[in-house]
Image (cartoon, coloured by chain):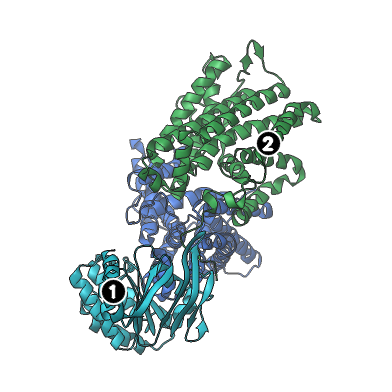
């Protein structure tokens, strides 16, 4: 579904990604692992068109998307759950979800109602707090809101940037369970994570990014077993 | 000083009228600041141009000898023309002078200087095309001086009532738009987090453009109202009105729409009080003093949450 | 200026210096000498603003306030207004000190503010200063209001009283040269580095242990003192000061001088002064359009060459800094 071929990207003179190639098949959960500043978030930004690659290509369903504006890319069915949630704190829960559905504004109103219902079922806490401002929610609730907001776009591909960050272990478990649920309901997911253990536990396949390059890849189970040292290094970060 | 007390209620009425107009202009500043984090220095000029367009239309209507010039239809026409002119001009300014800068991620210096340049350019363009002498609004043809309310010692003319009503109506309309519509939500989203808004599929450039359209149009409307009220307009009026409106926006909390309205009203009243009890020559100083006091002691303003940080791009 | 070697630079400077020294003799009229003198004066003024805006990155758009304060304080000290007639060399340090103090006074409230707000507050102070100069003739006559102060004593150095544009030109040229040396020294001193660090990233500067409060106040004080100096020179040259000399547009003129040449570049600032002062003289007939063109130029400059004329693109400093999201407009 999504393929990156030899993608290179830089922030001005600083090269962050060099020759990143990865693939996400329909229905999979793929995780992209790596330590701090390895280039994980940059990869997602490049997919979304927030950063134009200086080399290589990004292909979605056999169509190149790396030169398109972000709003067009998103309209093709990709949604993002940003790093540190980045929900709209000054807008209510409902308004956040409405913004999430913005890329589908041409669709019938019943779709919106359905999607809202689905999100509230998945995250009952959000339903309770529908009229509260995003800023008043707890960290865990904000993460749920961020995910729910992304789901409102009915994405075919969901990108998640470090969903475990800043959350207590119990919440992390919950979140990753939900990610599995979403995947079972038909959404392809690319998860970027520093917490390798948690990510590999639910993923089908994984890639490891280091200094802007893919240094390892394979089935999640294989990655988990292979190199306990690696895992210690990754898990430590 | 105390002998000024009897005229206080009357002055307060003037203050509120003025404040309503300040609020209208302030909205333009606050909206643009909200989405772009920049102070559109040229906003005052959009106000001026609105006043001139209104004047031109009024003169044309008077000369066209259409008979009954009733404010009920003339005023909306003036407002519409002025708002269109200012709105479109504001959008043009954004498209050609500011967009290249903010797309580049330019630092705060670039857009501010460009805005200053735009302000100088527009001000002089008005002066060169319309002359340096003031123009006069024939307000009395629209609002006869006999139309007024007398409450106790206070005379409230129909003009003042209409002025305040129009201003409040426009502000309320904008508030509704921002709170209840999808465009409004997009504007708020862009103001809060431009990147994430783009990821939601929002066409950020278009939202910013519409923001300029609306904010500038409101400034233009204020120009017509001020023209009608003071009857004299000149090419320089945008400068002081602009700075005062900016003060109002900051007072209320820049980026906050209700704050702009509140700040405007407060500043109008404060200015009237100061002029009543202190030397009227320092009228303009009042706004600056308020501005400096607010920025030093409560930079978030009365209703705002975002603090203007050093280093914020 | 990486293309121009150090030796070439020196040669260029020497050539320009020679031209500057001979200029009044080559000038077609006394009026032109006057213009040249004004260029030197404004270049000095702009160098002062360059410290605040160019070095430290503090966008002061009310700088004319210091210019005005300097002029008026000199007028207070050397005119019939208060009956004081202090000699030039005694009045100068007082003026400089007074202006520097005002620099600190005006700078202090702005310390916590960011770019736009700093600009607006300084603008406010500029306006307040103008209004005070205009209105402080009641209840006590301090500034003599709109009539200004006239019959200011001309400078008397070593027994010789200045007269004639040519003498003033050389005086201002000397002052400009001194100011250039002082600016260069400051730029490469510890405080100069501190200012640059603050301009680039204030948070990081503070993390490095720089006392940003003190550094910023120093920038304001020193920048203001340059303006005060220039103000005294203006007052003693024109022999009069009026509030109208110190309008907001003057602040913008000086700012433009700093920006056109390239922020922080000393040569650029002088070039800016030449451009801003000389161009209106050259395009006399188009005087009415001057401001129009000026405004347009500012807008265009920011789009196409924000780093100024002399600073090469690669070495551009604060203005051309790449943002955190470098994605170009699709």
Identify the residue shown where x is 33% and y is 88%: A186
Chain A palette colour = cyan
* Side of C39 relative to B101 (left or right): right
Please report contact status of discs 2 and 1: CB closer than 8 Å, yes or no. Answer: no
- State the blue chain: B
Q: Nearer the viewer, mark 2 or mark 1?
A: 2
Q: Which residue is mark 2?
A: C7
Chain letter of the residue beneath label 1 in the structure image: A
Disc 1, SS = helix
Q: Based on the displayed image, in which of its 4 quarters is residue C207 positioned?
A: top left
Q: Which quadrant holds the C terminus of chain A?
A: bottom left
Chain letter of the residue beneath label 2 in the structure image: C
Q: Which quadrant holds the N terminus of chain A?
A: bottom left
Q: Is residue A110 visible?
A: yes
Q: Which residue is mark 1?
A: A145
Chain C palette colour = green
Q: Based on the displayed image, in which of its 4 quarters is residue B148 positioned?
A: bottom left
Q: Is residue B230 shown above or below C86?
A: below
* Side of A142 relative to B262 (left or right): left
């Amino acid at each position: 579904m999504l393929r990156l071929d030899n993608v290179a990207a830089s922030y001005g003179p600083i090269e962050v990604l060099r020759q990143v190639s990865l693939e996400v098949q329909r229905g999979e959960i793929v995780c992209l692992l790596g330590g701090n500043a390895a280039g994980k978030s940059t990869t997602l930004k490049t997919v979304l068109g927030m950063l134009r690659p200086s080399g290589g290509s990004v292909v979605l369903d056999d169509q190149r998307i790396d030169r398109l504006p972000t709003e067009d890319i998103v309209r093709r069915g990709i949604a993002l759950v940003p790093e540190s949630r980045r929900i709209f704190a000054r807008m209510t829960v409902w308004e956040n979800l409405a913004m999430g559905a913005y890329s589908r504004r041409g669709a019938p109103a019943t779709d919106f109602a359905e999607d809202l219902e689905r999100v509230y079922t998945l995250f009952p806490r959000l339903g309770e707090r529908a009229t509260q401002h995003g800023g008043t929610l707890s960290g865990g609730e904000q993460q749920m809101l961020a995910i729910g907001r992304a789901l409102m776009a009915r994405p075919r591909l969901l990108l998640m940037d470090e969903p475990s960050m800043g959350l207590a272990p119990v919440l992390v478990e919950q979140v990753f369970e939900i990610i599995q649920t979403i995947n079972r309901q038909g959404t392809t997911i690319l998860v970027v994570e520093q917490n390798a253990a948690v990510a590999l536990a639910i993923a089908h396949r994984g890639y490891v990014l280091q200094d802007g390059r893919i240094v390892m890849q394979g089935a999640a189970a294989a990655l988990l077993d292979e190199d306990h040292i690696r895992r210690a290094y990754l898990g430590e970060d | 000083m105390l002998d000024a007390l009897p005229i206080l209620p009357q002055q307060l009425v003037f203050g509120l009228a003025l404040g309503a107009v300040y609020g209208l202009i302030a909205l333009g500043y606050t909206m643009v600041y909200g989405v772009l984090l920049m102070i559109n220095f040229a906003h005052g000029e959009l106000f001026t141009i609105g006043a001139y367009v209104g004047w031109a239309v009024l003169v044309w209507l008077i000369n066209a000898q259409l008979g009954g010039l009733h404010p009920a239809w003339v005023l909306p026409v003036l407002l519409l023309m002025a708002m269109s002119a200012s709105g479109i001009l504001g959008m043009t300014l954004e498209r050609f002078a500011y967009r290249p800068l903010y797309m580049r991620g330019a630092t705060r210096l670039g857009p501010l200087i460009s805005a200053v340049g735009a302000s100088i350019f527009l001000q002089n363009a008005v002066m060169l095309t319309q002359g340096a002498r003031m123009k006069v609004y024939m307000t009395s043809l629209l609002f006869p001086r006999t139309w007024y309310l007398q409450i106790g010692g206070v005379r409230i003319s129909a003009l003042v009532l209409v002025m305040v009503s129009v201003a409040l109506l426009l502000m309320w309309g904008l508030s509704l738009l921002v709170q209840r519509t999808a465009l409004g939500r997009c504007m708020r989203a862009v103001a809060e987090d431009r990147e994430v808004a783009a990821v939601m599929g929002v066409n950020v450039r278009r939202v910013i453009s519409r923001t300029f359209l609306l904010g500038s149009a409101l400034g233009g409307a204020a120009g017509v109202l001020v023209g009608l009220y003071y009857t004299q307009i000149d090419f320089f009026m945008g400068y002081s009105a602009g700075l005062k409106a900016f003060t109002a926006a900051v007072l209320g909390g820049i980026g906050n729409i209700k704050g702009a309205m509140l700040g405007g009203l407060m500043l109008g009243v404060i200015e009237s009080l100061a002029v009543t009890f202190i030397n009227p020559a320092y009228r303009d100083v009042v706004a600056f003093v308020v501005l400096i006091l607010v920025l030093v002691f409560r930079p978030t303003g009365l209703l705002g949450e975002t603090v203007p940080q050093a280093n914020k791009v | 200026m990486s293309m121009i070697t150090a030796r070439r630079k020196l040669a260029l400077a020497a050539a320009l210096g020679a031209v500057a020294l001979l200029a009044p003799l080559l000038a077609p009229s006394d009026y032109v000498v006057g213009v040249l003198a004004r260029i030197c004066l404004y270049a000095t003024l702009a160098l002062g603003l360059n410290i605040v805006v160019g070095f430290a990155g503090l966008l002061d758009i009310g700088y004319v306030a210091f210019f005005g304060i300097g002029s008026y304080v000199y007028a207070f000290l050397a005119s019939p207004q208060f009956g004081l007639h202090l000699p030039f060399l005694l009045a100068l340090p007082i003026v400089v000190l007074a202006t520097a103090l005002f620099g600190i006074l005006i700078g202090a409230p702005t310390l916590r503010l960011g770019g736009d707000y700093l600009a607006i507050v300084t603008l406010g102070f500029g306006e307040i200063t103008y209004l005070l100069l205009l209105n402080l003739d009641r209840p006590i006559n301090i500034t003599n209001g709109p009539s200004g102060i006239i019959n200011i004593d001309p400078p008397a150095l070593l027994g010789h009283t200045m007269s004639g544009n040519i003498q003033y030109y050389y005086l201002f040229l000397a002052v400009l040269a001194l100011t250039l040396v002082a600016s260069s020294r400051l730029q490469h001193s510890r405080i100069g580095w501190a200012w640059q660090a603050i301009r680039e990233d204030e948070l990081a500067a503070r993390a490095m242990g720089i006392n940003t409060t003190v550094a910023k106040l120093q920038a304001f004080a020193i920048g203001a003192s340059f303006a005060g100096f220039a103000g005294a020179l203006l007052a003693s040259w024109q022999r009069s000061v009026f509030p109208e000399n110190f309008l907001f547009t003057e602040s913008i003129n000086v700012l433009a001088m700093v920006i056109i040449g390239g922020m922080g570049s000393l040569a650029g600032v002088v070039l800016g002064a030449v451009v801003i002062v000389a161009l209106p003289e050259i395009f006399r007939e188009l005087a009415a359009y001057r401001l129009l063109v000026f405004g347009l130029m500012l807008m265009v400059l920011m789009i196409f060459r924000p780093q100024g004329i002399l600073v090469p693109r690669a070495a551009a400093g604060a203005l051309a800094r790449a943002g955190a999201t470098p994605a170009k407009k699709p």
